[in-house]
Image: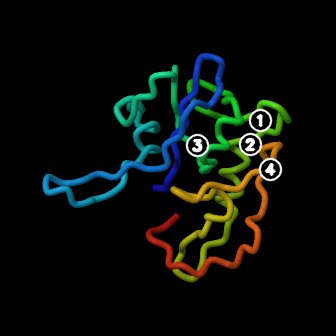
Amino acid sequence: MRLVSLIAYDAEGNVVATLDHLVVRDESGMVTGLVDFGAQEDGGGRLREVWEVSSATGSGTWPEWLGPRAADFRVELTDKRITALVHKTSGHRRDRAEIEAVIEATEPNERGERDIRHLVGGPNRPLLLDEEGRTTERPGRQPNRLPVIGRL
């Protein structure tokens, strides 16, 4: 399992909304986990079971978190799966296969965990993008030494 975000798009392929994560709660309101968007999509489940976006004609998973800058992109689909995001003005492509290859090439630490936060961002911490849709470094970014939950 690896966390992914959800992207909703309109009939022209323009990104109209994103969802970083969704928690699952028990009957008493205690958080018991996160919805696995990727498993829902991979298992053939409809993402409308997860969320409804009135201006969207479709939605899919994406391995990065782009925050509000996602609206600067349009989706490319292959068999109803988002395979790339293309920046509306610069044409810069964020290709799923390339992103997933870089994730897989990341060496695990001594506990077997891959820290990929610098590659994909994360819930409530989207990647910082320039005006052309390319990833940029965060100003004054220090190496993150916060503990990692689970295996990425």
Question: What residue lies at 45% left-to-right and 28% top-to-bottom?
Answer: 53
**Marks 2 and 3 close (CB-CB < 8 Å):** no
Residue 86 image point, x, y percent: 75, 34
Is 91 situated left or right of 79 in this image? right
Q: CA distance from mark 1 to mark 4?
A: 11 Å
Q: Nearer the viewer, mark 3 or mark 1?
A: 1
Residue that numbered label 4 is attached to? 130
Above or below, 81 relative to 125: above
Q: Nearer the viewer, residue 74 or 35?
A: 74
Per the image, the residue denoted by label 1 is 87
Q: Position of residue 4 (x, y in %)?
A: 52, 49
Tell me what residue is drawn at x 61 percent, y 73 percent.
108
Residue beneath disc 2: 94
The type of residue carrying mark 2 is: Arg
Do labels 1 and 2 touch, CB within 8 Å? yes
Please give left or right for residue 45 compared with residue 66 in the image. left
Circle 3 — which element? strand
SS at badge 4 = loop
